[in-house]
Image (cartoon, rainbow, N blue to C red):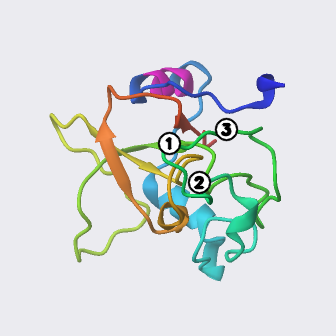
Amino acid sequence: QVTDYPVTFIRWWGAKAFALYYDVKLPTEAQWEYAAKAGSQNYFYAVYDGISVDDANWNNLKLNPAIHHVRAAKSGQPNPFGLYNLAGNVWEWMADNYQAFTSDPAVDPLVEVSGSTTRSWRGGSWNYHQATLESSARYYDDEDKGNDHFGFRIAK
């Protein structure tokens, strides 16, 4: 049953090594957010219809600690781009270093900060609250962190 689950307990460098080995990429925050918002449809939540969080795997019972776990990577309903579980299930490491947004215009940026080990992650997780499911929600941690709610997605 767990062979269909997303990879967890992975640090940023493990996700990056996978991407390099298979000649794919980790998505940038901009790419991930575009997919989560279903492009110009501007979805509020990163779910199949932009509204219904019932389909996402998150801590909707507000248990502390949460007692459920990840589910199959292809579960629930896909969004208009055919992507599953952008909201909930596992946090997804991004290619970018984390940096606060500025008012400077940018088109599909990859944020790289020399010397920084702080990386962005998006999407929420099975053990987090509803606000983390928002398409524009951003979080970060040190690239050497990894646990049962950190995973990744690839872009090609």
Disc with the residue nearer the chain's start (1 vs 3)? 1
Q: What element carries label 1?
A: loop
Who comes first in sequence, dot 2 or dot 1?
Answer: 2
**Residue 96 in the image, given as x and y percentages of width and height:** 36, 46
Majority SS type along the magenta span: helix
Which quadrant, please, contains the C terminus?
A: top right
Asked whether, in this view, residue 119 is left or right of residue 31, the answer is left
Question: What residue is disc 1 on?
Answer: 65
Specify the quadrant that holds the N terminus.
Answer: top right
Which residue, given by chain and number where applicable, does mark 2 sit on? Answer: 59
Residue in front for this viewpoint, 84 or 57:
57
Is residue 5 placed above or below 104 in the rendered structure? Answer: above
Decide: few, some or many residues near mark 1? Use Cα within 10 Å; few <14, some 14-19, many ≥20.
few
At which x and y percent is residue 70?
Answer: 67, 38
Identify which residue is drawn at 50% across, 59% down: 129
Q: Label 3 neighbourhood size at 10 Å, few (<14), some (14-19), many (20+)?
A: many
Taking the magenta stretch, the answer to whether it contains residue 16 is yes
Quarter of image, res 101 = bottom left
Where is 89 relative to 8, above or below?
below
Instruction: Give, as a three-letter code, the residue at label 1.
Output: Pro
Residue 149 is inside the magenta segment:
no
Image position, residue 88 (x, y; %): 61, 52
Check the image and name the residue furthest to the left.
115
Reply above or below: 9 against 114. above
